Structures are given as C-alpha cells and as structure tokens.
Amino acid sequence: QIPFGRRLPCDIYWHGVSFHDKNIFSGQVNKFPGMTETVRKITLTRAMRIMQDLFPLEYDFYPRSWILPDELSLFVSQFHTAKDSDPSWKPTYIVKPDGGCQGDGIYLIKDPGDIRLTGSTQSRPAVLQEYICEPLLVDKLKFDIRLYVLLKSLEPLEIYIAKDGLCRFCTEPYQEPTLKNLHQIFMHLTNYSLNIHSGNFIHSESGNTGSKRTFSSVLCSLSTTGVDSKKVWSDIISLVIKTIIALTPELKVYYQSDIPAGKPGPTCFQILGFDILLMENLKPMLMEVNANPSMRIGHERELSPGVFENVPSPVDEEVKVAVIRDTLRLVDPQKKKKKDTHLEDVRTNRSAKGRLRCITSLGKETNHSLECSSWATSDLKQAPEASEKLPDAAKSVEAALPSVCLRQVFPKYASYFNHLCLMDKVAALFIHFLGVKGTTRLGPTGFRTFIRNCKLSNSNFSMAAVDILYIDITRRWNSMSIDKESGMCLQAFVEAFFSLARKKYKLLPLQEQVSMLIEFCEKRVAALHGRRLVWGCG
Ligand code: ADP
C-alpha cells in the first residue's frame, strides 16, 4: 500500500478499483482502462446484442434484454403482440438498475405496468431481462456460480479460467415465479450480500455444504446423479470466451486511448468475476460480469448490536487465494525474465523462496478441487502448462507450489472461436479513423474520412447523406449515454457500419453483409497505405 504516493516504478501494480494512474509507464497493472464501463449492465447488454444480431445461435446464453427507459415502448409493444397471439403466456421479467451491484434495486415483474419509472433508484436507467424461470436446483434451492477469469492480455487475447468457483445459494426453497412470491428475494436472487441477512443462511467450514459452496463440490454431487460435468465445463468455457470476445472491441478502444501504441506504457491484466446461472437443462446462462469481484476471504459476524467480528471463510479462501496466487505466478516478471534468458540466478532463487513463504502464509491449500469433475473436456484438450518451459531452478520452485488453478483457454481453443472476432475488425477501423490519440469518440471529420477513404459514398449516398447519418446516430447515442462526451462512440459506429453494410449488400444475412463490408474497407485502407508508402519512397 502506498498511501503517500510512489517514487519508484514497480513491476506489478495492484489497483483497488479501476485503472486510474496515468503516470505509469512500465510494468503491469491489474486493471484495464474502461473495464468498469464496459461491463456495466447496459453496455454489456449492448455488446451482447451486437453479437446476438450477428451470431444468434452462438450467443443464446444471454437472456433477451431491453434497455430502460429508451426501449420501454418497444418492450411494451413486443409484450402485447406476443400476449395477443397467446393469451395463456405468462412470462416473468427481472429489472436491474445499470451500475447496480449486490442485488441493489432489482425486482421482478409479470406485467409492463409494474415497471417502476419514478423514485430514486427506480428512475435509474436499467436493463429489463427475461427471467430464467427454470434454474437448476440443488437441495430445492436456486444458486449461481461465481467463476474467476483472468484476462491476461488483450492483444494478443489471452484468457485463463479458474478450475474452481463459488456457488451462492438462495435461502428459501425455489418456486416458479407467481404474483405471490415475486417479491421474495431469498427465493429468487442468489446474491450473497442479500441472503446473508436471511435467518436460513448457513455458514459452513466445508466447501460442500451451506449457503456458499465450491463449484467443484456441487458439480461432484451433480455428477453422481448422472450430470455430464465435462459438458457443463465445456459450455461454461465457451460462454466465457464468447463473452470476452464481445467485450474486446470496446476494451481496445479504451486501451489505445489510455495507453497509446508506441509509448512505453504498462501492460494490463485483470481478474473478472463471471456470474453464471445453470438452467434446469444444464445450459449455462450469463447473468453479469464483474470488473471488481470481491476477494474477501472472511465475513463479519455481529457479536452484539453494532459489534462485529471478522470470521475467516474457508470456502472463499480455498477458491480466491488460488486465483490471486496463480495470477501473480502468470504475470510474474521474474518468470518472464527467466524464460527469456534461461539463467539460473541465485538472486532470483532467493526471491522465489521469499515468494513461497509469502504464499504459504496467505492460507492453507487444499487438494480437494475438481477431484471428480475433470476440467479437461473431450473436445477441448489442454496443452502443456507454461511451467514446462521453465529452467530447472524455477521448475523446482514451481513444483513446491500448489497445482495451478488458472488454466489457459484462449488462445488454446482459439480455432473454435476466431470466426466470432468480427467486431474486433470494426473496432480496428474505428481506431484507425479516430486520428487523435487519447480519444474514444469519432468526430464528424473522422467519419467523413472513413467514408471517403473506403469509397462508400456514391450517387445514391451523397456526402450530405453521410453527415445526416452521422448526426442522427450520434445524437441518439449521446442522448442515451451517461457521460456527456461529444462524438461517435464505438457502439454508435457499429450501428452506422451495420446500416452501411445492409445498404451495400442487400438481401444477404447480416453476418455476411458485415463481413463483406469489413473486407471491402480493409482493402481500401490497405491500398491507400500502400500508395502512401510508395509516395513516401518517392
Ligand atoms: P447484481 O449486480 O446486482 O448482483 P445480477 O445481474 O447479478 O445483479 O443479478 C442478481 C441476481 O439476480 C443474480 O445473481 C441471479 O440470482 C438473479 N438474476 C439476475 N438475472 C436473472 C435472470 N435473467 N433470470 C433469473 N435470475 C436472474
């Protein structure tokens, strides 16, 4: 902790909340610029929707959602159309305020008329989402999975997933939502922060009982009932990779703005918390992504009114200590140096011993994890661990540490997912035309340059029409946005890009239209650069 400021550069910076220090020029920071904004409920919903438009079958793990208040009338009219065609249809929806956490301000509805549009928390922008009425139950209780994911690098994309996570249980037996039980948060919301206040909450010393359990123990007991745990894991890995692919375009825009290319800036990594619900049919559904998952390994117990005691939580400790330990192992600059030079340096050895002591003092390790639910899946095979590439001295230190809990899933399984990275290419075009470094918004001139350079204007689409398109889309997006920056944000540019693609390649499916326009633009930009290069060579 550096309460009075830092004088010397560090090799790893561990920030508490977000990437906020513009005076870091080297080393690695544990936060990505813009991550908090990117995973907010509304931004995440928009990013997922873009991917659902392009790849509906691949992105069916995120519930259908509407953004309030902007899409209220759209939702109401879709609701009534569906209801008119099937009067027996009785859906349930969940309303979640944007930027909220720990279940704050969340409520369930069965009728659009119950959406609360006035009052302090209720008037906040929110996401309205189809409620998953048939979750998988264990001991008659609804639960969700908190999984820890390390985004180790954005470019190239590197993702690791922890072998074990936490299952957070409701504290009232689950019943399908009815008007009577809609308000029972202990039945419908799995948040620990809410259920801890229920008289039924069970603190347990062991990871396989109580209101918070390890995912491995839940999976283990499910597999005794015939559940295919390999398939569950395979689907979860796929959900995580696809979600991060949906987030990377936005993150890249923030990254180039805060850490411009060519500058000796720091690199970033970040531990994310994925909240996943298993449906009765075992399909995992994404609830949300947390940029700042709680790393607490204890809870408070009220001894007498107002007097609290901190009690260790072995379940949290088992899962979270391993995540932080492995993150540090993976980003360890010493290890990188060792790998680069292959030198057996005594000094390094000593510091490694120091690290070992520090790790053991963090908490006892258990070998319980995933004994019965194999992580490796038949269709997704693991490659050798990074430690195999280490020199001998480092290997012996590695061998003394508990087994690795973070497993690489990307680029390891990249070949299954590369076709989904279309939006990265759109973001690359957007960043190319941003021009001024340090910005995340495209101005009208940048947009015009994009149209001109890519030769997208013609007799049917004049430059005046281009300006109107820019103004229309930008004005609408800026009226919905919370920050009042001017210019076109990436998601608005994507909307403009889709509209240009539809115009240019009529009648094709959207995915093909967008792919073709990307290819078209990339060729134009490359040709332009080629020509410039030739001119430059005289
Ligand atoms: P918060 O950030 O406030 O925790 P979440 O989106 O994680 O908001 O939702 C809180 C809880 O509500 C989830 O952990 C889950 O139990 C429940 N929940 C959220 N969305 C849905 C949904 N679409 N269907 C069923 N349950 C949901």
Image: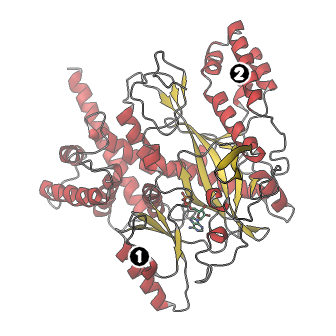
The C terminus lies in quadrant: top left
> x and y percent of residue 167 in the render?
71, 56
Real-space Cα separation, disc 1 to disc 2, in angstroms: 55 Å
Q: Nearer the viewer, residue 352 or 211?
A: 211
Q: Amino acid at mark 1?
A: Phe
For ligand 1, the image quadrant comes to bottom right
SS at mark 2?
helix
Q: Is residue 234 left or right of residue 117?
A: right
Q: Amino acid at mark 2?
A: Arg
Which of label 1 and label 2 is nearer to you? Answer: 2
Q: Nearer the viewer, residue 291 or 532?
A: 291
Tell which circle, 1 or 2, labels the residue nearer the N-terminal end: 1
> x and y percent of residue 32 in the render?
47, 38
- The mark found on residue 75 in the picture is 1
> x and y percent of residue 455 in the render?
22, 48
Mark 1 and mark 2 residues within 8 Å of each other at the beta carbon: no
Q: Nearer the viewer, residue 520 or 80?
A: 80
